[in-house]
Image (cartoon, rainbow, N blue to C red):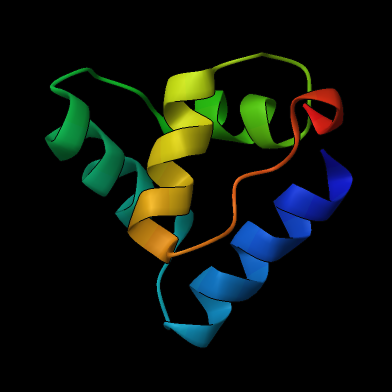
Amino acid sequence: MEEFRKEVRKALIDRDKSTGWLVNEINAATGCHYDTGYLSKVLNGRRKSEQIVSECCRILDLKPPLPEEL
């Protein structure tokens, strides 16, 4: 999960966007309400959420991590 977290952070920096922006995009796409704290837990591997990981990949145009990396 560490590599995926780095890829997400790099993609946000490259786009000059924040994690708050990413959470808003995820919320708009899913109709759910997540916050930056939950996103941080997912990216740091303390929570599992395939939905958030797949939305991060879709929004940031990233390659999905392998299941064993989650």
Quadrant where the image shows the N terminus: top right
Quadrant where the image shows the C terminus: top right
Name the residue at 85% across, 25% down: 68
Dividing the picture into quarters, in which one does residue 17 lie? bottom left
Against 29, is 30 above or below? Answer: above
The image shows residue 3 at horizontal and vertical percentages of: 84, 53
The image shows residue 48 at horizontal and vertical percentages of: 65, 14
Q: On the picture, is 59 further left or further right than 6?
A: left
Dividing the picture into quarters, in which one does residue 59 lie? bottom left
The image shows residue 67 at horizontal and vertical percentages of: 75, 25
Q: How many labels does the image show?
A: 0
The image shows residue 14 at horizontal and vertical percentages of: 53, 85
Q: Which of 37 and 15 is in front in this view?
A: 15
Against 1, is 8 above or below? Answer: below
Against 65, is 6 above or below? Answer: below
Q: Nearer the viewer, residue 12 or 20?
A: 12
Name the residue at 17% across, 36% down: 29
